[in-house]
Image (cartoon, rainbow, N blue to C red):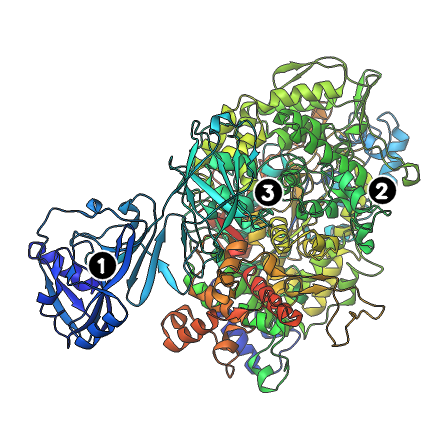
């Protein structure tokens, strides 16, 4: 029908149109009022059986029918159905045709437009008056409009302002309403609700709960969703907390608003809801965008937030509803919540148990290795975190990233600083305590909002760096310098990004030797372990310090000791022309972009330069909400550390899994030659994403982990094994576990509490890959449907041909395959079953799907958009 | 690797397989052996002035005397301790004469000494790549083969990668990560690279992707537990990647991974089949495990993988291999550090000695057709520092080793004009010859005109009177 109409309109719009009816139900509207009994088709009972329209006129809401069939007229009487002989312009109707026919539609003979029509609250079945032009649902713009539904070509299509998640098998997204097509539009009845004016809100306020009846209920397969709109068109967001209370929050800098026009719709079955209103104080942190351009609000969506979290926080630990909330906020307001350098970030990583709120890895190591408290870590694994253990630094770091209740972004930055930027290598013999101090001192400085030169200076003053380079032996004694120039050079080159191109001879013959002299009398001495091990901090002496002023970076540097001189070098160096060029590129290339163009690079450099006081946090904020970061041309290959920690993080449901070390990353990092604090390039930093991407060996490890050793993904419980390595079993032979995986705590069900394969597959893809479904093609879908049905695709489609390879073309065109996949896609999974073995089987299947997803190319590289 | 190369190899190997049981001596069926460059990068700026030294001299104005005085602290001596310095020379070095020049070779490097005497080693002095002393940037320049490479150009092509592309062959990366030197040139973007001619063979005996079952397995009812996680996932991923590759355009950043999958799947089975017929020599294995293991077992494992790569050379179409050994940035305590590292590489019954001996057992022509190139991103300062080490320099030496090499000194190892500079702060070896002139000469040996195809030598210096035209005799 649609195609006929379009082709006709190209030729003769002045003469109306031809509407083709097919046998069965047709969902149509007309542009002029029709007298049905005078229409040759509609009045012919051999042609049209019945016509339904829905009248919604404020308090009158009823179905009306028309039929020329006498028996149907009689039935209508018996059911007390209203009859109507007229189909007005704007009205939509269901027409049941007994045979196909074409109907000429006259050109519009009036001046009314759709917007003239006053719609009543509730459902309205209407059509476009204009028979020439299709329209988008957004442009309908009815007040309090919530939903628009169209039935076309055998499928329902829907639009709603609240951005209901991706369509499932049952309906598609509605992009256009066609002329002569009927559609449902829902108008919500608003419920005014008064709160204290925003401008008077000085802190987060929680209003006492009140009860409200929702405006509209709908029954669909989507995950529970709520939408509210206030009369100032500032979008609020609602989410349901653990107690079933709907929390409405708004971050708004719109002052003076005191009335919120609540339009609530929900697909929950409840009829009354308890609300809690939170009005969050407008963010006081307004950071400049520097030379970056802020991403548009329409592009700052759920996918953009997830990409940001994957890049900067190993995916983070935020709930789906928190992510949705951030996506509905302005990007600047959202990013300052998402990325902080505090010890904890309850929004990014909600608390789960009693974890100390500390930035210090050493303190966290002490917490997890505490022999007197078995609630912190299972006994067997405490040794991993004991500071006597050489691997305690790497294990503590990974645990900090994965622990709910801390701040994975903080430790992401910590990794950059200690494994890439101001890198030291435990393979060089750096003992754990000095290494912990190296990390902790730098993180503290960052957390205190120290300027970046202060952060670098702190790094330069750490004992671990001195042990790495040996300048703890630099002295000025008896009028002569005795020492080496290693760190003197790398302080400029690696820390500040100053390679000496500004004046090569000066750099080599003056700046570096003088810096070596500035780095004298920095006392950090080795002691045997029984005496406490090497010093963890440097003591800055003056007796053997080169006390005179030194010429460095063509300026005079003075200071009574090395610490003072380091501060000055860092401060000057941060503004040096070479540092301004190189350092910001080092940062962005590390975190986010392996494809910087010249233009991107210039913006990065300009942005850094524009900061009067260089500070990495506002720099990353501006970048993270910029069009540079969220650009289709950006891509970033994941290093082994990034990829593995991201997957481990997202695999972890809660801290109980961390307690039992279920998602320990150490072995896999070792397999990929990427142990944290043992950078492959020594002081020049760890494996980069680009290096990882070029390394087929790294790919092979990751691939084989999924194919050959997938139990890290598929395990559904954890038990305490006996001396024989066996799990205890109950009388029915079921394994007794101390921990169950329970993916249902993460994966949302539909409104019926069901976990449909199609939905689960798509959710898992978005959860781990966060591309908004861009790369979720029919091929990925097919494999995941099969796996969630516990088979590989070949086995699923034909058990007699387990080695068959199915191409994208086959999957999308072969009707048998399509049908089998559709059948598999609607299967309900037992994730929420009360039967333990069924639930474990369902969790196992989720694990199969995850093992597959993380081995696809899309887990190895992230695009900007 | 390109499909073209793979198909070519496959047909050759198929032909060989059709002859019958594949012999362990693969080279018996080859009329000629291809010339292979084995590049070993010493990361950190190796101090080769510590490896080959002038004899100590009592003549205070001589090179030998000033050299030893300037480097006294390396041996924990003072510059005025002539007796100590003389003793240090005698205790640490074996004296030989090469091309009429008397020199000492570090005692730990007995194999190198014998190879020098056998005229299998070209000791090239005064070579330089980068003119700055920054590790990272200098390495980029060294491996890319161009002084124009910027400090942020981490994605450019490498000279080894460009060479194999020109030869229609493959670079075998034996290192943990693929070094830039192996990167092939990108067709359109000179800041990017194309690694379709790189095969990663870090762990030769475990190369390839897990494959639960094959048609033969199913026919013979092996792996009957086809519902296991391994079975399901290995079949899923194999099928997925086979279908996925055609969906992803060449320019996509995701393409690398489908290419990895193809390469590993294509090579893995073939390599495994070949290496099942090749017993790893005990001496090679001992380099990384057992009583004779090297100080750096990682280098030992690379030697083992290199041995296997040569044994499967026809399958891999190898013309370039990349190895690495790091830790040469000897700002402190360099005597003991270098003793271990140089010993690992050049010592009797150590790394290269063991490899060459085992290759000679297969076919003596192998060592004739392999050129081992050893260099680092820059040298060190002439004078040692106050921490018993040396700081960054620029000019350095490089070594080309092989039975086809015309051995001897190339460039003056002990130029007297260094004497005046030994007392100048931060002075170092003056690099009079571009490293790329040397590399180009090696590539010319591999194939005519290959050097000029890979390097632009227009402005690359070469020391007066020095020529590499006779660098190889075979």
B195 to B316, vertically: above or below: above
Would you call the spot at circle 3 few (<14 residues within 10 Å), some (14-19), or many (20 or more)?
A: many
Q: Which residue is the site of mark 3? A: A348
Q: Position of residue A156 (x, y in %)?
A: 33, 62
What is the chain identity of the residue bearing mark 1?
A
Q: Which residue is the site of mark 1? A: A92
Which residue is drawn at the image coordinates 87% and 37% (left, top)?
A: A533
Q: Which residue is the site of mark 2? A: B92
Residues at circles 2 and 3 in contact by the CB criterion of under 8 Å? no
Q: Position of residue A348 (x, y in %)?
A: 59, 42
Query: SS for tag 1?
Result: strand
Q: Is residue B258 left or right of residue A727?
A: left
What is the chain identity of the residue bearing mark 3?
A
Q: Are marks 2 and 1 on the same chain?
A: no
A759 to A687, vertically: above or below: below
Query: SS for tag 3?
Result: loop
């Amino acid at each position: 029908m649609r195609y006929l109409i379009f082709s006709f309109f190209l030729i003769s719009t002045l003469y109306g149109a031809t509407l083709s009816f097919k046998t069965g139900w047709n969902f149509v509207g007309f542009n002029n009022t029709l007298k049905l009994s005078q229409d040759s088709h509609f009045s012919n009972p051999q042609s049209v059986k019945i016509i339904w329209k829905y009248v919604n006129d404020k308090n009158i809401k009823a179905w009306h029918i028309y039929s020329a069939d006498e028996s149907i007229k009689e039935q209508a009487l018996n059911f007390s159905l209203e009859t109507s002989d007229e189909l007005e312009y704007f009205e939509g109707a269901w027409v049941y045709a007994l045979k196909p026919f074409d109907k000429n539609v006259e050109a519009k003979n009036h001046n009314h437009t759709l917007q003239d029509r006053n719609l009543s609250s509730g459902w309205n079945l209407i059509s476009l008056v204009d028979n020439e032009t299709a329209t988008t649902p957004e442009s309908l713009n009815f007040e309090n409009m919530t939903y628009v539904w169209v039935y076309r070509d055998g499928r329902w299509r829907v639009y709603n302002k609240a951005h209901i998640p991706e369509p499932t098998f049952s309906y598609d997204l509605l992009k256009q309403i066609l002329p002569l097509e009927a559609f449902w539009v829902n108008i919500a009845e608003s419920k005014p609700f008064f709160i204290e004016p925003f401008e008077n809100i000085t802190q987060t306020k929680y209003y006492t709960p009140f009860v409200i009846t929702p405006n509209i209920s709908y029954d669909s397969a989507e995950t529970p969703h709520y939408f509210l709109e206030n009369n100032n068109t500032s979008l609020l967001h609602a989410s349901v907390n653990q107690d079933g209370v709907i929390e409405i929050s708004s971050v708004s800098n719109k002052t003076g608003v005191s009335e919120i026009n609540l339009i609530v719709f929900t697909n929950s079955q409840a009829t009354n809801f308890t609300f809690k209103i939170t009005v969050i104080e407008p963010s006081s942190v307004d950071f400049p965008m520097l030379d970056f351009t802020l991403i548009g609000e329409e592009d700052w969506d759920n996918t953009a937030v997830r990409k940001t979290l994957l890049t900067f926080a190993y995916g983070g630990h935020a709930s789906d509803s928190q992510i949705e909330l951030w996506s509905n906020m302005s990007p600047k307001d959202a990013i300052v919540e998402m990325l902080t350098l505090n010890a904890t970030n309850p929004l990014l990583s909600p608390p789960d148990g009693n974890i100390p709120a500390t930035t210090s890895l050493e303190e966290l190591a002490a917490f997890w290795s505490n022999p007197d408290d078995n609630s912190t870590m299972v006994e067997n694994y405490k040794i991993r975190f004991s500071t006597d253990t050489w691997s305690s630094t790497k294990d503590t770091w990974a645990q900090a990233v994965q622990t709910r209740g801390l701040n994975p972004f903080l430790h992401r930055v910590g990794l950059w600083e200690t494994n890439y930027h101001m890198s030291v290598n435990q393979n060089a013999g750096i003992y754990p305590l000095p290494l912990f101090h190296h990390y902790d001192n730098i993180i503290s400085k960052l957390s205190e909002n120290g300027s970046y030169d202060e952060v670098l200076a702190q790094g330069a003053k750490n004992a671990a760096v001195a042990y790495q380079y040996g300048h703890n032996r630099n002295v000025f004694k008896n009028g002569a310098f005795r020492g080496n120039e290693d760190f003197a050079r790398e302080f400029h080159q690696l820390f500040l990004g100053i390679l000496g191109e500004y004046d090569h001879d000066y750099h080599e013959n003056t700046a570096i030797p003088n810096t070596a002299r500035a780095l004298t009398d920095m006392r950090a001495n080795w002691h045997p372990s029984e005496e406490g091990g090497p010093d963890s901090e440097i003591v800055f002496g003056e007796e053997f310090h080169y006390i005179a002023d030194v010429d460095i970076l063509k300026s005079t540097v003075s200071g009574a000791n090395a610490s003072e001189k380091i501060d000055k070098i860092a401060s000057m160096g941060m503004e040096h022309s070479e540092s301004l060029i190189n350092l910001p590129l080092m940062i962005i290339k590390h975190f986010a972009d392996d494809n910087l163009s010249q233009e991107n690079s210039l913006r990065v450099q300009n942005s850094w330069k524009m900061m009067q006081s260089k500070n990495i946090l506002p720099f990353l904020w501006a970048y993270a909400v910029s069009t540079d970061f969220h650009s289709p041309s950006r891509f970033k290959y994941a290093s082994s550390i990034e990829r593995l920690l991201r997957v481990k993080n997202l695999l972890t449901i809660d801290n109980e899994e961390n307690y039992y070390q279920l998602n320990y990353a150490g072995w896999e990092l070792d397999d990929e030659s990427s142990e944290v604090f043992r950078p492959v390039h020594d002081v020049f930093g760890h494996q980069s994403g680009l290096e990882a991407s070029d390394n087929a060996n790294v790919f092979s490890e990751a691939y084989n982990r999924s194919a050959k050793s997938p139990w890290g993904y598929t395990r559904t419980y954890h038990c305490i094994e006996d001396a024989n390595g066996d799990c205890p079993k109950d009388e029915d032979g079921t394994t007794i576990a101390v921990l169950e995986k329970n993916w249902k705590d993460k994966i949302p069900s539909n409104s019926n509490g069901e976990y449909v394969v199609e939905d689960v597959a798509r959710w898992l893809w978005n959860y781990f890959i966060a591309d908004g479904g861009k790369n979720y093609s029919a091929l990925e879908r097919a494999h995941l449907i099969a796996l969630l049905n516990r088979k590989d695709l070949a086995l699923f489609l034909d058990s007699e041909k387990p080695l068959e390879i199915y191409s994208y073309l086959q999957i999308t065109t072969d009707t048998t395959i399509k049908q089998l996949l559709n059948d598999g896609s609607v299967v309900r999974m037992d994730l929420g079953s009360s039967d333990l073995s069924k639930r474990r089987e369902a969790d196992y299947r989720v694990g199969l799907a995850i093992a597959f997803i993380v081995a696809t190319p899309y887990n190895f590289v992230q695009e900007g958009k | 690797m390109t499909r073209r190369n793979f198909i070519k190899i496959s047909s050759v190997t198929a032909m060989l397989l059709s002859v019958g049981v594949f012999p362990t001596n693969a080279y018996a069926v080859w009329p000629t052996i291809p010339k292979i460059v084995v590049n070993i990068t010493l990361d950190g700026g190796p101090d080769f002035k510590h490896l080959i030294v002038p004899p100590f001299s009592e003549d205070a104005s001589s090179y030998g005397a000033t050299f030893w005085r300037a480097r006294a602290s390396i041996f924990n001596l003072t510059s005025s301790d002539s007796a100590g310095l003389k003793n240090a020379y005698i205790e640490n070095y074996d004296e030989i004469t090469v091309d009429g020049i008397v020199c000492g070779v570090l005692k730990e490097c007995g194999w190198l000494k014998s190879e020098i005497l056998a005229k299998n080693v070209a000791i090239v002095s005064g070579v330089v790549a980068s003119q700055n002393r920054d590790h990272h940037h200098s390495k980029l320049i060294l491996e890319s083969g161009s002084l124009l490479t910027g400090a942020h150009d981490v994605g450019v092509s490498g000279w080894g990668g460009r060479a194999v592309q020109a030869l229609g062959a493959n670079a075998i990366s034996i290192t943990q990560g693929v070094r830039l030197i192996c990167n092939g040139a990108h067709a359109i973007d000179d800041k990017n690279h194309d690694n379709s001619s790189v095969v990663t063979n870090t762990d030769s005996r475990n190369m390839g992707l897990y494959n639960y079952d094959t048609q033969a397995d199913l026919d013979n009812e092996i792996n009957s537990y086809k519902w296991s996680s391994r079975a399901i996932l290995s079949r899923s991923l194999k099928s997925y990647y086979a279908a996925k590759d055609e969906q992803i355009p060449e320019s996509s950043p995701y393409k690398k991974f489908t290419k990895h999958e193809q390469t590993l799947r294509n090579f893995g089975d073939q390599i495994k089949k070949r290496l099942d017929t090749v017993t790893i020599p005990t001496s090679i294995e001992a380099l990384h495990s057992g009583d004779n293991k090297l100080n750096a077992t990682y280098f030992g494992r690379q030697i083992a993988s290199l041995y296997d790569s040569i044994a499967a050379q026809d399958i891999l179409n190898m013309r370039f291999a990349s190895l690495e050994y790091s830790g040469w940035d000897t700002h402190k305590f360099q005597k003991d550090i270098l003793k271990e590292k140089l010993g690992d590489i050049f010592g009797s019954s150590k790394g290269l000695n063991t490899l060459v001996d085992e290759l000679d057992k297969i076919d003596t022509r192998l060592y004739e057709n392999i050129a081992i190139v050893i260099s680092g991103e820059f040298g060190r300062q002439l004078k040692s520092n106050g921490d018993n080490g040396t700081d960054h320099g620029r000019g350095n030496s490089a070594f080309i080793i092989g039975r086809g090499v015309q051995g001897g000194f190339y460039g003056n190892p002990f130029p007297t004009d260094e004497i005046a500079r030994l007392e100048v702060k931060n002075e170092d070896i003056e690099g009079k010859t571009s490293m790329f002139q040397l590399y180009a000469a090696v590539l010319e040996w591999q194939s005519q005109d290959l050097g000029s195809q890979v390097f632009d030598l227009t402005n690359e210096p070469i020391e007066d009177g020095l020529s590499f035209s006779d660098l190889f005799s075979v």
